[in-house]
Image (cartoon, grey):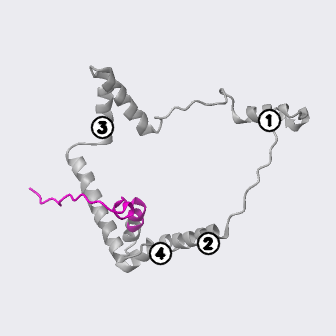
Amino acid sequence: MKELKPVVFVQGSKEFYRPNYYVQNILIKALSEGITDPKELQKIASLEKVADVYRSLDKLAIRKEYHEALARNNISLDYIVENIKGLADNARREEVQLHSLQTLLRSLGLEKYERQESGGKNWEELIREVNEGKGREENDFIDGEVEYEVITPEVPNEEKEIRRKEAALGKELYEK
């Protein structure tokens, strides 16, 4: 049997132990371009230490091993959905059926249903009612549509600098 890595559970900073998929994807892209120097990878991924590069590569290796283990055991998304569907269709208890359907809804991001206070009216109808209540004239509307002006706020200088740095990093990363 293949020697497996030990699983270690630790407590500490969430940022230190969180899955950093964004950094991992940047490292994969850089490695696919032939960049293997850890200091260069550190700069590309905007990491503080070279140790963070190695930590991210370790997480990437564990992630790869995990997906390979799932595949070896014939566990795919189809398998998971099929079994949840089987529970929803064939479970003896209604509570199990309900929970399996709720799991499917959560996987789609549809788990929360909030009442709309507007009573089913869209935002343009609400604006029209407010304008009519203030004694606005009919000519404020064109073909039943509400006239409004969008004022785009000015981008702060700090944000402009961040965007400039990200664009430069993107060019450096993808144009090699």
**What secondary structure is found at the residue carrying circle 1?**
strand
- Check if residue 4 falls in the magenta segment: yes
Q: Which mark is residue 18?
A: none
Where is residue 129 drawn, in percent x and y? 79, 31
Instruction: Say few, some or many: other residues with alpha carbon within 10 Å of mark 4 (under 14 / 14 to 19 / 20 or more).
Output: few
Q: Give the labeled residue for mark 1.
A: 145
| 53 on left or right of 158 | left
Q: Which mark is residue 80?
A: 3
Where is residue 140 drawn, in percent x and y? 88, 38
Question: Reading the chain from its start, which is encountered first: label 4 or label 2?
Answer: 2
Which residue is located at x 83 percent, y 31 percent? 133
| 18 on left or right of 68 | right
Which of the two residues, 161 or 134, is positioned nearer the viewer here?
Answer: 134
* The N terminus sits in image quarter: bottom left
Q: Give the labeled residue for mark 2.
A: 161
Which of the two residues, 128 or 165, is positioned nearer the viewer here?
Answer: 128
Q: What's the amino acid at mark 4?
A: Lys
Q: What's the amino acid at mark 3?
A: Ile
Image: magenta residue range: 1-27
Q: What's the amino acid at mark 2?
A: Glu
